[in-house]
Amino acid sequence: MNDLEIEEQYLWTFMSDKQKGFLEAFEIVLPDVSHRFCVRHLHTNFKRAGYNGMALKNALWKAASATTIDSEWSRSHFSSLPKCDILLNNLCEVFNKFILDARDKPILKLLETIRHLLMARINSNREKAEKWNLGDICPTIKKALAKTMKDAASYIPKKSNTWNYEVIGPMEGDTWVVDLYNKTCGRKKWELSGIPCKHAISAIWLKKDEVLDYVDDCYKVETYRKIYEVSILPMNGPDLWPKSQNSSPLPPSYLKKKKKERKQKTKKERRR
C-alpha cells in the first residue's frame, strides 16, 4: 500500500484473475478498495467444474453483464466511482504484450526497455491529443456515443419535471426512470460508464440540452491531455549512473525438485 502511495482506498479499483491468495491479501492490505474478477478466468474455472457448452457460457456472460440490481453478482454491484464497467483484464493482457520483448531480459535491461517503451508511448499520446479540440470528448468515446444516439431514436421520453423523465422503449415493459440532474438511469449503465445511455439521451433531447455536457469529465480532451502532460525524461547511459553503496543483489535460492520414483510394472501387469 505504501509503495503504491494509496491513501484513500475507496478511490481505487483492482481486477484480478485466478491468482491464489489475492482475496486474503486484499482483505488484510487493501480492505476498502473495489475488487473485480476477470470473467474470462471465471469461465475457465466454470468449465473445469464441468459446466461446458455455449448455452451455459452465454448464461454466465449475461449474468456478469447485467446492470440491474436484482442480479446476485454482476456489473450491478460495481462502484459507480471509477466510471468503468469492464469485465475483463484485457488492459493487463495488452500491457504484457506491449512489454513482451523486455520480459526475458535481465532486470536492468528489462526496466530500461520498459522505460523506453513508455517514454515513446506517452509522447505519442500527448502529440495525438494536441490535435484534438479542447472542450470536446475523446474520439473513441464520441464514436461510441454516436452509435448510442442511433439506438435512442426508438425511445419516447415522458417529462415529469425539469430533471426527471420516464423513458419508454419499443418493447412492452421496456420503461426506465432517468434523472438528468444526478446523471442516473434505472438501467445503471450510465452511472457505471459515465457515458449517457440511450434512455438518458432520449430525455436529454427532450430537454433540448447538449448530450456532450452529460458525459463524465474523465472522457474529455482536457483530462486526456492532463494524463500525458508529464514526460518520462531521457537518461544518460549506465556509465554515468551514481554508484550504489548497497551490496550487490544475489539470485534467488533454488531447490531442485526431486523426481518422483516410478513404480516398475511387472511383465504380467504390462500385458494387462
Image (cartoon, rainbow, N blue to C red):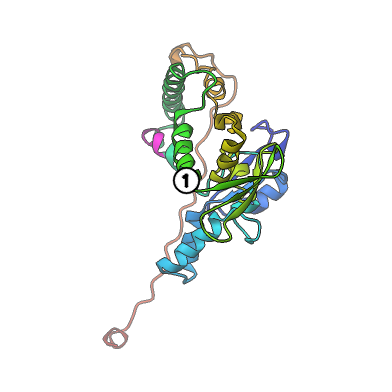
The quadrant in which the C terminus is found is bottom left
Q: Start and end of the magenta stretch?
A: 97-102
Three-letter residue code for mark 1 = Asp
Give 161 or 1, whichever is nearer the viewer: 161
Left or right of 17 on screen, residue 71: right
Give 152 or 41, whichever is nearer the viewer: 152
Whole-percent x, y for residue 106 in the image: 42, 32
Q: Residue at x 49, y 69 (%)?
A: 49
Left or right of 40 on screen, residue 67: right
Q: Is residue 21 visible?
A: no
Task: Judge whether 38 appears above or below 110 on screen.
Answer: below
Give 256 or 13, whichever is nearer the viewer: 13
Whole-percent x, y for residue 145 in the image: 48, 37
Whole-percent x, y for residue 142 in the image: 47, 32
The quadrant in which the N terminus is found is top right
| Other residues around mark 1 within 10 Å, as few (<14) / some (14–19) / many (≥20) | some
Q: What secondary structure prevails in the magenta region? A: helix
Q: Is residue 31 visible?
A: yes
Q: Say which residue label 1 marks.
A: 151
Image-quadrant location for residue 196? top right
Left or right of 243 on screen, residue 131: left
Magenta stretch containing residue 159, yes or no? Answer: no
Q: Residue at x 72, y 33 (%)?
A: 7
Task: Judge whether 40 appears above or below 221 on screen.
Answer: below
Q: Residue at x 48, y 42 (%)?
A: 148
Task: Judge whether 100 appears above or below 187 on screen.
Answer: above
Whole-percent x, y for residue 141 in the image: 48, 34
